[in-house]
């Protein structure tokens, strides 16, 4: 009888243990299911945030182009009024090249080589307009030349220099474009000898703020877009992480 009682007690204990184990397993499975659902929801939220950022980035990129188009047309109109037909044809060719760049460029990052070639089309039109009064200097460090950056960054800085300083400058107009690499960072500077104050740059237009927002959207690391006035003129500077072309 004692053996039968012991066996019965063991059976009851095993049944209770099985029930507890089943309850624990079901609880764990429920928790895992909830964790999986949470991870799925978090992943969807991350994807949604990326899509929102991409849409904002595209919108910011689109805002730059009409401004450049207007300035380019004004330059060609000035040449037409002066009846400088050969210069006008040359400017139209450069303008056509710009339109090709605009229609082809759909990337959030481009090579600096593409960016500076695009900007040179704009500068060629300005050179036609001002002739020998415009002095352009390039200080490009080879170690930084293969870097990538958001499109229209350099063009925006250069256009900003003309709009707020050089267009109103009497005498020689000087523009210096500098690019160098400092460790894991790239530094781009555009310096002009215009007479404007930094407040004029900040309070008119959205060019620099546009570039600043696009840098913040696309790079996870430190970036900077700043402007200051010095004895040499007005300097616009951008800093962003160095990433060689082809390693996006």
Image (spheres, helix red, strand yellow):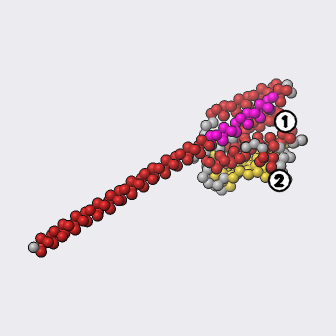
> In terms of depth relative to the viewer, which is nearer, 15 or 121?
15
Mark 2, other Cα within 10 Å: few <14 / some 14–19 / many ≥20 = few
Q: Residue at x 52, y 49 (%)?
A: 46
CA–CA distance in space, label 2 to label 1: 24 Å
Q: In the displayed image of the protein, which residue is found farthest to the right?
A: 171
Task: Kindly identify which numbered label has been placed on residue 209.
Answer: none
Q: Residue at x 63, y 36 (%)?
A: 105
Q: Residue 25, image x and y in percent?
A: 32, 59
Q: Is 226 part of what is drawn in magenta? A: no
Location of residue 127 with respect to 210 vertically, above or below: above
Task: Kindly identify which numbered label has been placed on residue 230.
Answer: 2
> In terms of depth relative to the viewer, which is nearer, 151 or 131?
151
Tag 1 secondary structure: helix
Location of residue 164 with respect to 241 vertically, above or below: above
Q: Is 71 part of what is drawn in magenta? A: yes
Q: Residue at x 16, y 68 (%)?
A: 8
Res 123 visible: yes
Quarter of the image with the N terminus in it: bottom left
Q: Main secondary structure of the magenta part?
A: helix
Q: Quadrant of residue 157?
A: top right
Task: Kindly identify which numbered label has been placed on residue 130.
Answer: 1
Mark 1, other Cα within 10 Å: few <14 / some 14–19 / many ≥20 = few
Is 226 displayed left or right of 1 in the figure? right
Res 193 visible: no
Q: Which residues are magenta?
A: 57-77
Q: In the displayed image of the protein, which residue is found farthest to the bottom?
A: 2
Is 132 displayed left or right of 156 in the figure? right
């Amino acid at each position: 009888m004692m053996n039968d009682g012991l066996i019965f007690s063991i059976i009851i204990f095993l049944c209770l243990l099985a029930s507890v184990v089943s309850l624990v397993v079901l609880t764990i499975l429920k928790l895992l299911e909830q964790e999986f659902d949470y991870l799925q929801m978090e992943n969807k939220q991350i994807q949604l945030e990326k899509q929102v950022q991409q849409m904002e980035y595209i919108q910011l990129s689109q805002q730059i182009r009409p401004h450049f188009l207007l300035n380019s047309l004004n330059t060609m109109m000035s040449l037409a009024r002066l009846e400088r037909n050969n210069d006008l044809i040359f400017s139209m060719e450069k303008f056509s090249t710009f339109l090709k760049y605009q229609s082809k460029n759909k990337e959030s990052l481009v090579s600096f080589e593409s960016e500076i070639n695009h900007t040179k089309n704009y500068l060629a039109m300005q050179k036609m307009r001002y002739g020998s009064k415009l002095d352009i200097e390039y200080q490009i460090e080879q170690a930084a030349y293969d870097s990538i950056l958001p499109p229209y960054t350099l063009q925006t800085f250069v256009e900003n220099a003309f709009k707020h300083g050089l267009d109103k400058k009497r005498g020689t107009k000087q523009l210096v474009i500098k690019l160098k690499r400092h460790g894991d960072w790239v530094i781009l500077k555009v310096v002009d000898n215009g007479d404007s104050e930094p407040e004029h740059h900040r309070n008119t237009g959205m060019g620099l703020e546009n570039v600043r927002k696009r840098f913040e959207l696309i790079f996870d690391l430190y970036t900077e877009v700043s402007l200051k006035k010095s004895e040499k003129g007005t300097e616009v500077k951008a800093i962003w992480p160095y990433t060689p072309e082809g390693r996006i």
